[in-house]
Image: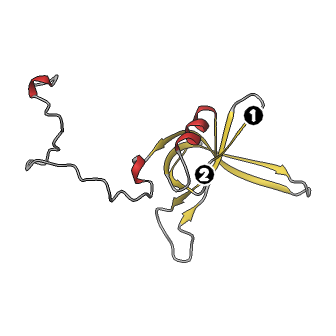
């Protein structure tokens, strides 16, 4: 089975292009930390990724350099001959689904100006507006 799941940070903004038929194609790479690190070995990989259609549009709209993404897809290899006549081999992750893995405000941004939520002594957060227990759909 050809299935890959990755969580990493965008190394640059996704590059999106459109085919003659109007379908979108997003290309990007992410930095993925290795789970086990060996001395003298790299501890991060930078896989090239490509997404098509609605998935590409989602990535273009919501992700930028430095943000974390979770994705699933498959490994695809290929080759082409460049202008110098040299055969170039490629390996890409073809993204089939993508998702957020951090909140919008935590993407490497400073959130020090946001107030801490107020909690009661029992640990529950106070909700402004004074909702009465009678208004809740469950009791």
Q: Which residue is mark 1?
A: 19
Q: Which residue is mark 2?
A: 13
Does residue 45 lie above or below 94 as drawn? Answer: below
Q: Residue at x 18, y 39 (%)?
A: 127
Residue 99 left/right relative to 13? left
Residue 111 left/right relative to 46? left
Question: Label 1 crowding class (10 Å Cα cut-off): few <14, some 14-19, many 20+?
Answer: few
Q: Residue at x 91, y 56 (%)?
A: 85
Q: Are marks 1 and 2 in contact (CB under 8 Å)?
A: no
SS category of the residue bearing label 2:
loop
Q: Residue at x 10, y 47 (%)?
A: 120
Does residue 125 lie above or below 114 as drawn? Answer: above
Report whether residue 8 is seen.
Answer: yes
Residue 57 left/right relative to 123? right
Q: Nearer the viewer, mark 1 or mark 2?
A: 2
Does residue 28 lie above or below 46 as drawn? Answer: above
Q: CA distance from mark 1 to mark 2?
A: 19 Å
N-terminal label among 1 and 2: 2
């Amino acid at each position: 089975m050809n299935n890959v799941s990755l969580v990493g940070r965008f190394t640059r903004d996704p590059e999106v292009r459109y085919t003659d038929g109007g379908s979108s194609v997003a290309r990007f790479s992410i930095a993925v930390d290795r789970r086990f690190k060996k001395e003298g070995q790299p501890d991060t990989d930078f896989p090239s990724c490509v997404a098509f259609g609605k998935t590409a549009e989602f990535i273009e709209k919501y992700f930028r350099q430095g943000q974390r993404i979770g994705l699933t897809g498959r490994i695809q290899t290929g080759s082409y001959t460049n202008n110098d006549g040299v055969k170039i081999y490629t390996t890409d992750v073809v993204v089939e689904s993508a998702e957020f893995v951090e909140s919008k405000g935590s993407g490497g941004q400073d959130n020090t100006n946001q107030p801490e939520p107020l909690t009661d002594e029992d640990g529950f957060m106070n909700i402004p507006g004074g909702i009465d227990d009678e208004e809740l759909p469950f009791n």
